[in-house]
Image (cartoon, coloured by chain):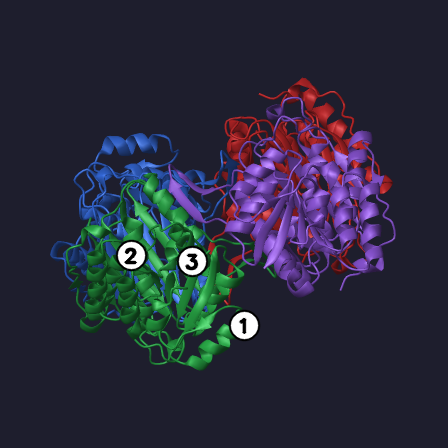
Chain colours: A red, B blue, C green, D purple
Amino acid sequence: MLKAGVIGTGMIGQDHIRRMTTVLAGVTVTAVTDVDLEVAKRVAGGLPGTVVHGSGEDLIADPAVDAVVVCSWGPTHERYVLAAIAAGKQVFCEKPLATTERACRRIVEAESAAGRRLVQVGYMRRYDGAYRALKAVVDSGAIGTPLMMHCAHRNAGVPAFYEKESAITDTAVHEIDMVRWMFGEEITAARVLVPRRNRNGGGLQDPLFLILELTGGAIVDVEISVNIRYGYDIRGEVIGEDGTAALGDLTPVTVRTARHLTAPIPSDWRERFASAYDVELQEWIDSLAGGGTPAGPSAWDGYAAAVVSDASVAALRTGSRVEVTLMPRPALYDPA
Amino acid sequence: MLKAGVIGTGMIGQDHIRRMTTVLAGVTVTAVTDVDLEVAKRVAGGLPGTVVHGSGEDLIADPAVDAVVVCSWGPTHERYVLAAIAAGKQVFCEKPLATTERACRRIVEAESAAGRRLVQVGYMRRYDGAYRALKAVVDSGAIGTPLMMHCAHRNAGVPAFYEKESAITDTAVHEIDMVRWMFGEEITAARVLVPRRNRNGGGLQDPLFLILELTGGAIVDVEISVNIRYGYDIRGEVIGEDGTAALGDLTPVTVRTARHLTAPIPSDWRERFASAYDVELQEWIDSLAGGGTPAGPSAWDGYAAAVVSDASVAALRTGSRVEVTLMPRPALYDPA
Amino acid sequence: MLKAGVIGTGMIGQDHIRRMTTVLAGVTVTAVTDVDLEVAKRVAGGLPGTVVHGSGEDLIADPAVDAVVVCSWGPTHERYVLAAIAAGKQVFCEKPLATTERACRRIVEAESAAGRRLVQVGYMRRYDGAYRALKAVVDSGAIGTPLMMHCAHRNAGVPAFYEKESAITDTAVHEIDMVRWMFGEEITAARVLVPRRNRNGGGLQDPLFLILELTGGAIVDVEISVNIRYGYDIRGEVIGEDGTAALGDLTPVTVRTARHLTAPIPSDWRERFASAYDVELQEWIDSLAGGGTPAGPSAWDGYAAAVVSDASVAALRTGSRVEVTLMPRPALYDPA
Amino acid sequence: MLKAGVIGTGMIGQDHIRRMTTVLAGVTVTAVTDVDLEVAKRVAGGLPGTVVHGSGEDLIADPAVDAVVVCSWGPTHERYVLAAIAAGKQVFCEKPLATTERACRRIVEAESAAGRRLVQVGYMRRYDGAYRALKAVVDSGAIGTPLMMHCAHRNAGVPAFYEKESAITDTAVHEIDMVRWMFGEEITAARVLVPRRNRNGGGLQDPLFLILELTGGAIVDVEISVNIRYGYDIRGEVIGEDGTAALGDLTPVTVRTARHLTAPIPSDWRERFASAYDVELQEWIDSLAGGGTPAGPSAWDGYAAAVVSDASVAALRTGSRVEVTLMPRPALYDPA
């Protein structure tokens, strides 16, 4: 039974705690903390045997904590991940790994110095059944070498604090990680085109059209529409030399009424990716049994996503193509 | 943490133990037994703190067992379910509830006498996301009163011990339970038509065409094809006054190669219904927390399925329409 | 250029005249007649060089008429078809070939006596692209020997004069012909089941569930729903030994709005089968060039449909299975 | 009956002659000519009453020709179209209208000077049922103002003479015209990105990714893959403020065999757009009855497509964004 300590008991922290206590097997939440200790206490109140620590550092030091789950505010991620590495404890860090390229690099260097994989980053697309089926087709060679990928990331709406660059840093960052994983290559350049503005978005620049280039020459485009009213919709089609493979519609039910065939579309990411979050954490828990190594997105993946995200934001600001330059990849992150 | 004892450690018993120990939350397997004690010991060997009992009765009597999961051979179900009722313990019984109408009736009477719901039967279709979405549409009134339902239950192949009547008792019995739940009505009569025989089935009479009548006059047809090679496929469309609602294709990925658009079809029920089994047991576990009542298929549902299944077998044997006659339903099973 | 004479200038006659004058190639309408001569004159008024005859017999006798198109009231079909056979002229007869089995038999006997194919009956499903694609798959052997077929024939609504038996004689008769063509076999028995009644149908018995048996043992079921509001929908799936083949959705456009993916459904048969009518007549015209033989549904097909339709009506009236008995098939109708 | 003269009896000319003589109504082919008179004579040999002229100019001057169909080699289009305008005869010109912007402009000016619409250009996408359904949804406002459109134009393979720029001038030019029609706006700039090269294309640069900007700010992207083996596939999805609308799959039949649901994909454009060509010419023929005006793509459309095509080729050569500059639109081409 893995003993997990959770740093940050806000919305996503509470959701992971719910998941670990009422959905997943092989894990128990032994400790929590939060910048607002009252919230941490209230959350712990519903969990028998869960202690509240005064700080993330105290929680990491607790011998009753085997593994740390970081769900705190982004700018604090670096501190807690580095502390966990220093303590030799496994750490699952919600995205982003850290809020600056430099901070991500420090984590990569610390983990490399430690000499073993201790960090997993919360890019959960890789755990979605449809994306996995898509990758299996691509990897099988059935469509030949992949040359392009068309993606769309659509939200019915976004909260008031969502800003122009959030479309890259909060939204398309999922595609940025997914594309690196799908192709098994790095992203080398980014462009952002700006179509006619959607009236639903108030003053927001929406949609955006992100275009990424990959090491092997493939081109990936991502339509980012975050006020498209009709629902939450994640699309992806890989174009190969001999054919294409696309995410399916996952339709649970089709209804024929009023001159139309209809199928439901999810309202938001919770509905679409609920089980991906479950699988993500369960596989992390399972991979750690008996001192194992986490198989999911690494600190390197978190670092690379940050660099590409920065380049994309620069591309949005300047209107130009921006090249992506990564540090040399430490051997720890060599593909198996 | 629910303490579960498992009677029967064959294929399905082992699968439920795996589920309870490595997938689901809130449950621990404290005891097991099997007609072959060596198998039970081998299974328990991998589980820290799980004891092996010499008999199902001993397991049921164990104070370290809160709830019993019956996965033994069908003819023994009645004995263990009655013992659990007598002990006042919750019992999850794999289908069938019992192998004769009379045995099912004794269980219904014992639970009624006990005065509270203690029995849940393992009809897992009710926990499948697509069937639930279908039922939600029907219940919403969007298609008007349901008048018909077309079903197909297709297997790529069946094992050697599968006999003529297995198409009813092992296969269509899932539709028999599903239809009662979908319509919220009882089945009143059955017919079985016998089409041209599939060469893939050896001497087996395959396919069959089962036609059921419901209390309110609706008619349900079920194509049962158990050697159809192409895969495992479960279809269902409810025909209402104003429209229809059908199970969707659940396609995770579509591939375009070699002049065709293709989408994968599951090989077997494990692939199609994997998560339904998880949801079924997790909801049972959750419903029992704090002395709660199981919300799933009841002993009455197990009894009714047995009676309809018997009538369908008689219809197959005689070639005639056979009426279904149920005992009066005890008040314990009144819909909420 | 085929010179066609049209008997009956009501709705369907006018539609065929429009088709032959403004859509199809290789045909000109040289003569028309109608029981209401004023209507015939009005229709001919828009067509340069088209004469109006006082009777169908006069039209058939006109040397400027190569081929006759019978669109008059059903009970008059026999008379005009027999007259065309007697005149040695090709005749395209809208369904039904004749309104009684006895009348159909007389046509079959007359054409057999004439010793060559002169009659084609207007069963246009055989000319629909989707049905042809379905038959091509079945004939290819890709799904093995066909064992069953599930059909649905759904109308949004029906006119006031539509009666209980119209569901067989006007509606399901299309499936009766299609099934004979799809399987290349005769129908040997019919049953009709009566589900719960649709409130949209007034007092009408709707839906019906027609079950047909074929020479080779295959079973075909047809849901007939004629007040199902949501639109006109024709479904068909053939169940083979190794797989199934089904009519596709023919979706021209899919729309994502308001939490739903939607695709349009036709309002009525005109929309769904418009091009099938065009293809039907064009192929008939083309087949007659240079004294050729019509390749479409024959008088035998019209006769067989009538016999099966009568048996189905008897099955609806009696609630029993009714056997179909056909006269011996004259050699003229042997498959090529 | 429209009397058509066909200039150019190569592959497409012969196909239009076949269409006008064996498929469409209201037209007769009275004259033909070709640069190779032997071919013209052979083609005319199968057509009773069709004369062969020694030159396009002679054909245009023939009083037995009401309307001219230009199917000759591209560089000769200008000459014949101008001659037809000079003769005051209607002319249907296969794409391209002419092979240079300057030549297109001369046609526009000549037709403007003539003061009435005499020219229609053969962009047949506008006559495809699926594109028309898509445009109807966009025009209905159901998805809000359109902001983007994603297109793909895929060929299984291309002939040996296909060159790098053919992907723009022969292939994407269909999307260039379609987009102007779909949005009712002009294209203002073009970019072409060059993904990893498909090994199936020999040395050809394939695929290409064309990005177009429209007057109102919308952005359209077109994947052009001309060696993608799997078949001919034309995709399009319009992204609006409130939803999206996409071309449907038009699936005539779905087959379930060997663990997969499959649907056929056309081999080439003939299969996909066969009826669009029929509708295109039939509507042109119908529109000319009684001295009417052609409603289809105008000389202005042909001119604009040429300018955008040139800009796209320049974008491909330079790797830069290239602006599109059109001459002022003559009043003759004002939208109705």
Q: Report how far apart the C-alphas of labels 2 and 1 lie in the structure.
A: 32 Å
Residue picked out by circle 1: C46
Position of D313 relative to A171 (above/below): above
Residue at x 21%, y 43% (from the top left corner): B73
> Relative to C195, is A73 above or below?
above
Provide the chain ID for the residue under circle 2: C
Chain letter for the residue marked with disc 1 in the picture = C
Left or right of residue C300: residue D216? right
- Secondary structure beneath disc 1? loop
* Residue A260 location (% of width, % of height): 51, 62
> Do tags 3 and 2 sit on the same chain?
yes
- Badge 2 marks a residue whose secondary structure is loop
**Which numbered circle lies on residue D49?**
none
Please check whether the numbered discs 2 and 1 fall on a single chain: yes
Eye-nearest disc, 1 or 3: 1
**Is tag 1's residue or tag 3's residue first in the polypeptide sequence?**
1
Q: Nearer the viewer, mark 2 or mark 1?
A: 1
Pointer 2: what residue?
C298
Residue displayed at 41% across by 41% down: B265
Q: Secondary structure at mark 3?
A: helix
- Which quadrant holds residue A138? top right
Q: Are marks 1 and 3 in contact (CB under 8 Å)?
A: no
Horizontal relation, residue B31 to residue D97: left or right: left
Residue lying farthest to the top in this orientation = A331
Image quarter in which the N terminus of chain D is found: bottom right
- C-alpha distance separating marks 3 and 2: 14 Å
Amino acid carrying mark 2 in the image: Ser
Q: In which quarter of the view is residue A123 placed? A: top right
Q: Marks 1 and 3, Cα distance to the nearest angstrom?
A: 21 Å
Which residue is painted at 20% across and 45% down in the image? B197
- Judging by the rendered image, the residue that carries numbered circle 3 is C281
